[in-house]
Amino acid sequence: MLDSLQILFIMDGKGPYVWSCLLILIIIITINIIIPVVRLKRIYREGTLEE
Amino acid sequence: MNRVWSRIKNWLIAMGSPPHFYRWATSSLPWLAGLAVIVFCAGLIWGLGFSPTDYKQGDVYRIIYIHVPSAILAESIYIFMAISGFISMVWRAKIAGMLINSAAPLGAGFTLIALLTGSIWGKTTWGTWWVWDARLTSTLIMFFLYAAIIGLHSSIENKTKGDRAVSILAVLGVVIVPIIKKSVDWWQTLHQPSTFTLTSSPSMSPDMYLPLLVCVLGFYCLFIFMLTNGLRAEIISRERDKSWVKKQFFKY
């Protein structure tokens, strides 16, 4: 099990290239999901404070 | 058939109303998120973990499961924005302008993913991070177009005028999409021909091609979820002074 995970992670020395692509994907998607949530929360907070 | 068409038409007209869309988006968002996570993860796990190794490139070809769906989505989002821009200019639908504003950061994000992952893939296969190749350069221009749309809208105080300006830019800029698509046929490039074509069967083995199709589907599901999520914030931000927002959102 650990051996196959290691093979998957290393990918004959090409693993860092593949996994860094996955990391870039996750980071950009997370930013794009979080920004609208933060924006909504800020509007809600401002709206509540106005009242 | 006419009844079905009329129902679809009525539903689309109703969706043009920001309060109606907001209510629909709020109730649909958990389902969209669930679907996106399932299909997106299934495609990536299948492609990165279980598809066979390529006999020429080895395992590094697995970048295809991130790079190709991102590139397809980057182009699709621009076409979607151009259609929204056309609707915004012709029918003055408020929601169409909001759609462009919510889709532009997502398009820019997916274009950036396509450029960065392509660069990493290029380093291992071509031996360089970047070449001023027709496909790469035209994709970079599309990234600048996305950036211009985001910048232009945020620089205009009046949102109606801003919508009009970005609609024109989105409609005019859509010419970049066929240029990107055809760049590998029109010019001598290092980039390989298109992976997906409507006119010929795929050159890849089904073991590699099927996970790629699931990845593309997963990316589209993720885009629909992210667009709905972004559009909710855009609607509330613009309609914050309207009574329906005050009643529903601020509860007063």
Image (cartoon, rainbow, N blue to C red):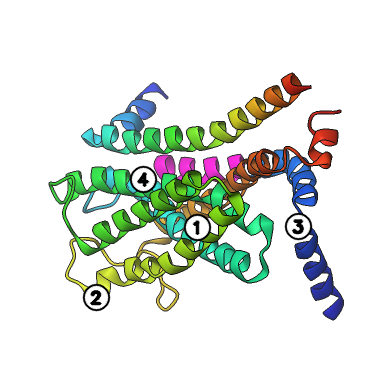
**Dot 3 lies on which element?**
helix
What separation in Å lies between label 1 and label 2 (alpha carbons)? 29 Å
Marked residue nearer the N-terminal end (1 or 2): 1
**Can residue A40 be seen from the camera position used here?**
yes
Q: Which mark is residue B112?
A: 4
Marked residue nearer the N-terminal end (4 or 3): 3
Q: Which mark is residue B15?
A: 3
The residue shown at (67%, 43%) is B238
The residue shown at (36%, 52%) is B143
**Dot 4 lies on which element?**
helix
Q: Which residue extends farthest front? A: B158
Residue assigned mark 2: B186
Q: Is residue B161 magenta?
A: no
What separation in Å lies between label 4 and label 3 (alpha carbons)? 30 Å
Q: Amino acid at mark 2?
A: Trp
Along the line of sight, the residue nearer the viewer: B103 or B224: B103
The part of the chain drawn in magenta is B36-51
Chain of the residue displaying label 1: B
What separation in Å lies between label 1 and label 3 (alpha carbons)? 21 Å
Quarter of the figure with residue B239: top right
Q: Amino acid at mark 4?
A: Leu
Q: Are marks 1 and 2 in contact (CB under 8 Å)?
A: no
Marked residue nearer the N-terminal end (1 or 4): 4
Q: Provide the major secondary structure of the magenta segment.
A: helix
Quarter of the figure with residue B133: bottom left
**Dot 1 lies on which element?**
helix
Q: Which mark is residue A49?
A: none
Quarter of the figure with residue B178: bottom left
Residue assigned mark 1: B166
The residue shown at (34%, 34%) is A19
